[in-house]
Image (cartoon, rainbow, N blue to C red):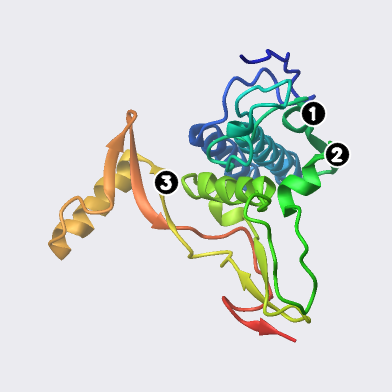
Amino acid sequence: MARLVNFTPTRGTGRIVQITPASINAIENYILWAETEVPRKVPIYMDRLAAHMAMTNQAFSRKMSFGPYDPTGMNTALAWRTPDQGIRRISQSYYLGWKMKKLGRGWFRVYNDSREAYFIEFGISTVGFGGQRRVPSRRIRRPVRKLAMVKTLRFMEKTWAYHRIWADVFKSKNAHGGFTQIVQAPAGGHERWEDITEHEAFSQFARNRRAGSGTVRLRHSGGSWQRRVRNRGSGTFNGPQLGSRLP
């Protein structure tokens, strides 16, 4: 049994049915156009990109929270399901509690306002800092929020806008303090298919033929020519290198 809840899209997002990599690619094309033609509009399209990422994050969170419906809470066989299985819904407040709030231009927060969200995310256990970790076998944490972020980053990796993400991941070294920071490279971290003109495509093909590589890194898709290039990044960032350890 499932409950149908009406969805009202955020102002300015239009009537969204599903966000796909093609949706993100379209926004990326707008950003590239604005960077050359109307730089003052870049923040507007960057805000739209952030909004779509936040909605994708919210969608992954709700998908993992939409498990079997058990209004009585008496079906113990449905308890302690993993996020990939779908968290059991009793009052449905956890599933419906995933909200998206705009804090500023290009700044969104995805959160859950239900009482049980904390215990589902971090588990119910007798864990103490500096002591031996003792977690009851049936009270493990089910990190829906963390997994939703990982799924969002993997989703963005399939798009042309992945180079615009500046992701910091902090991992605790031990229970007494300290951490390792892993920073995603802002440019050159991956390759993407970029639309080019027919003239550019034939020029590239001529260079490939002279090098004996034929049509490598070229393709004709959707009625247009595309070239495989490394991402250029969206600016210069000064920060720790990949995997560096901070004090």
Crowd tier of the residue under label 1, counting other residues whose Cα lies within 10 Å: few below 14, some 14–19, many 20 or above:
some
Few, some or many C-alpha atoms within 10 Å of disc 3 (few <14, some 14-19, many ≥20)?
some
Q: Which amino acid, mark 3?
A: Glu
Q: Secondary structure at mark 2?
A: loop
Q: Nearer the viewer, residue 51 or 4?
A: 4
Between marks 3 and 2, how big is the CA–CA gap? 46 Å
Q: Quadrant of residue 172?
A: bottom right
Residue wearing tag 1: 93
Kindly identify which residue carries mark 3: 194
Residue plotted at (70% across, 40% down): 54
- Spot the residue most to the left: 212
Q: Is residue 115 left or right of residue 81?
A: right
Q: Is residue 109 visible?
A: no
Which amino acid lies under the numbered mark 2 shown in the image of this protein?
Answer: Arg
Viewer-side label of 3, 2: 2
Q: Depth check: 5 or 154 in front?
A: 5
Q: Are marks 1 and 2 in contact (CB under 8 Å)?
A: yes
**Which one is earlier in the sequence, the residue at label 3 or at label 1?**
1
Where on the picture, by quarter, is residue 71?
top right
Comparing 105 with 226, the one in front is 105
Residue at position x 59%, y 19% in the image = 17
> Residue at the spot x=35%, y=52% of the render?
228
Which numbered disc, 3 or 1, marks the residue closer to the eye?
Answer: 1
Give yes or no for contact between labels 3 and 1 (Cβ–Cβ under 8 Å).
Answer: no
Q: Secondary structure at mark 1?
A: helix
Residue behind mark 2: 115
Measured in 3D between alpha carbons, the distance from the residue under mark 3 to the one under mark 1, in whole angstroms, is 43 Å
Residue 177 % position (x, y): 78, 81
Q: Is residue 178 visible?
A: yes
Q: Is residue 125 above or below residue 12?
A: below
